[in-house]
Structures are given as structure tokens and as C-alpha cells.
Image: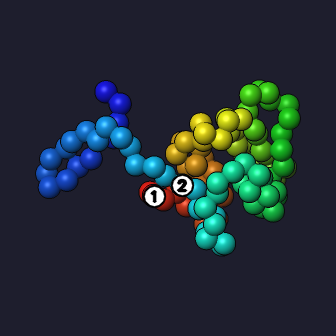
Amino acid sequence: MAGVWVFNNGVYRLESSPRARVLVHLPSGEVVSSYSSLDLILRGLGWERYYGGDPDLYQFHKHSSIDLISLPKDFSKFSSVHMYDIVVKNPNIFHVRDM
């Protein structure tokens, strides 16, 4: 069963099509719609591309931490899991919103 369980009025139900989510850059209010825009924002925050890992991933790291952001090369596979990883590693800079 694929989908999202929703609790409403004391009842759980399975929604077959999960809500679409977007990653929002809070300072500009911009929805991140491509890796090129995300790359510019992350570089401005001190993240650098990491080329030593899996060639099927875009990866970013910071010299000041052990954090690594790993994203699928294909932006169409960029999911809410990847979005929340970016949010956790950049508090108060990004937010995930339902469309």
C-alpha cells in the first residue's frame, strides 16, 4: 500500500496520492525548482560540492562540520526525504511546504 495515512476527525484513512511538497528558501521566499538554484543557495551558505563519493549523487559538504548532503542526480527523484535533510542541516534557512 503506497500513500500517506491521514488522521481526521478521529479516523485514519490512506490517501493514495501523497501531497506534493516543495523546498522553500526562507530569506528569499523562492521555491527551489532546480539543482542549479539550490547549488547557488548552498554555496552562499558555505557548502561545497563533494566529488569523492557516489557518481550518481550530487553531494555537498561543509569544512566546518561532518555533515554531508546527498541528492539524486535526477531532480525528478528529489523527494521530501532529501528536502528535510537540507532543512535539518540548514536551520532557519529552508522550509518544506505542501503545494
Q: Position of residue 83 (x, y in %)?
A: 58, 49
**Residue occupying image coordinates x 59% and y 36%:** 77
Residue 79 quadrant:
top right
Task: Quadrant for the N terminus, please.
Answer: top left
**Residue occupying image coordinates x 61% and y 61%:** 31
Q: Does any portion of residue 42 appear in the rendered image?
A: no
Q: Dots 1 and 2: beta carbons under 8 Å? A: yes
Residue bearing mark 2: 22
Q: Residues within 10 Å of mark 2 (few under 14, many from 20)?
A: some
| The one of 17 and 82 positioned closer to us in this rendering | 17
> Which amino acid, mark 1?
Met
The kind of secondary structure element at disc 1 is loop
Q: Position of residue 87 (x, y in %)?
A: 59, 55
Q: Position of residue 95 (x, y in %)?
A: 55, 61
Residue 14 falls left or right of residue 51: left
Compute the Cα span from label 1 to label 2. Answer: 7 Å
| The one of 38 and 49 positioned closer to us in this rendering | 38
| The one of 20 and 51 positioned closer to us in this rendering | 20
Residue bearing mark 1: 99
Residue 56 falls left or right of residue 2: right
